[in-house]
Image: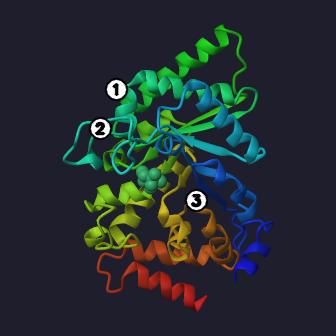
Amino acid sequence: RQEQFRALRSVEPVTKDGQRVSLLMNAGLLVDLPQLAESGAEGIGLFRTELQFMIASTMPKAEEQEAFYRNVMKQAGGRVVTFRTLDIGGDKVVPYFRAHEEENPALGWRAIRLSLDRPGLLRTQLRAMLKAAADTELKMMVPMVTEVSEIRAVRELLQKEVQHLSRFGHGLPRKLQFGAMLEVPALLWQLDELMAEVDFVSIGSNDLFQFSMAVDRGNARVSDRFDSLGRPFLRILRDIVRAGQRNKTPVTLCGELAGKTISAMALLGIGLRSVSMSPASIGPVKAMLLGLDLQALSTVVEEALDDKHPTTSMRDILMHFAESH
Ligand code: PEP
Ligand code: MG
């Protein structure tokens, strides 16, 4: 099967009925980069910048960050790289960055919260990204946004860095795309405001699922208790996709959900056309979608999601569709 998937590397990801899908991969270190060519991914949909910080024994200096981002883009060879600003805290521990012990780290001082409270840290990172992407395209996104005001605050800092660099004659990115990760349920009731502020939205389904269902993603006792393909979560995802269509804001999903073929199928069924996953999943997901009648699937999924008195689980319906097609 590995050989079969390898043979698909240069095949365009288009469904049987002609729908083009973006298959992107998740990465975080330079060793991941060769996987772009290996897997045939179109680009990197999630680059976890905190990994550089997590494997270092001291805080990476501004120049080190800049060199690292430049190297990542160089090795990506013109394919898109979506850098995520630092997602420290929660399950991502940075040893030299001692946060206080927290009773609920997942709900604690992390990601954009920490970045906004330590603007020097965030500005250093933003500047490193801007400089590394001089005269090329820069795509970046912010994790764990809870309120639209937070994304505005980051954008302001970004604007300041852009002005600062141009005042000192530095080259700037030719194009800058700025996005938010959708991981916190409160954002579901701010979708239109959020989408007015950003160029794209990326659903972090690992955290969005954890917070929507109130199950710790790292606790095996409960993490599989609720089905990520159950109606509640798929309806949430569908609402986001619809908001994206309404606002003409590109929506992608970069959690583990995208990497399982049956789940990827469900995501296409609710209207997503861009997904980012671990590189090993690109081949299997592509093989699935090449044979997929997406129109037929969408009809089945839409009806099943709107069913007020369901007798069959979404997962069973999806499995049945996969087997009978
Ligand atoms: C997510 O939460 O789905 C996500 C992609 O981010 P991470 O897994 O790094 O928290
Ligand atoms: Mg996350």
**Which residue is located at x 63 percent, y 63 percent?**
279
Residue 234 drawn above or below residue 125: below
Residue 247, numbered label: none
x and y percent of residue 128 in the render? 60, 27
Question: Do tag 1 and tag 3 residues touch (Cβ < 8 Å)?
Answer: no
* Of marks 1 and 3, the one in the foreground: 1
Asked if ligand 1 lies within 8 A of label 3, the reply is no
Q: Secondary structure at mark 1?
A: helix
Residue 30 drawn above or below residue 164: below
Q: Nearer the viewer, residue 47 or 189?
A: 47
**Which residue is located at x 68 percent, y 52 percent?**
33
The residue that label 2 is drawn on is: 109
Q: Residues within 10 Å of mark 2 (few under 14, many from 20)?
A: some
x and y percent of residue 20 in the render? 70, 62
The residue that label 1 is drawn on is: 117
The residue that label 3 is drawn on is: 275
Q: Residues within 10 Å of mark 3 (few under 14, many from 20)?
A: many
Q: Nearer the viewer, residue 264 or 120?
A: 120
Q: Amino acid at mark 1?
A: Asp
**Which residue is located at x 47 percent, y 38 percent?**
57
Q: Amino acid at mark 2?
A: Trp
* Of marks 2 and 3, the one in the foreground: 2
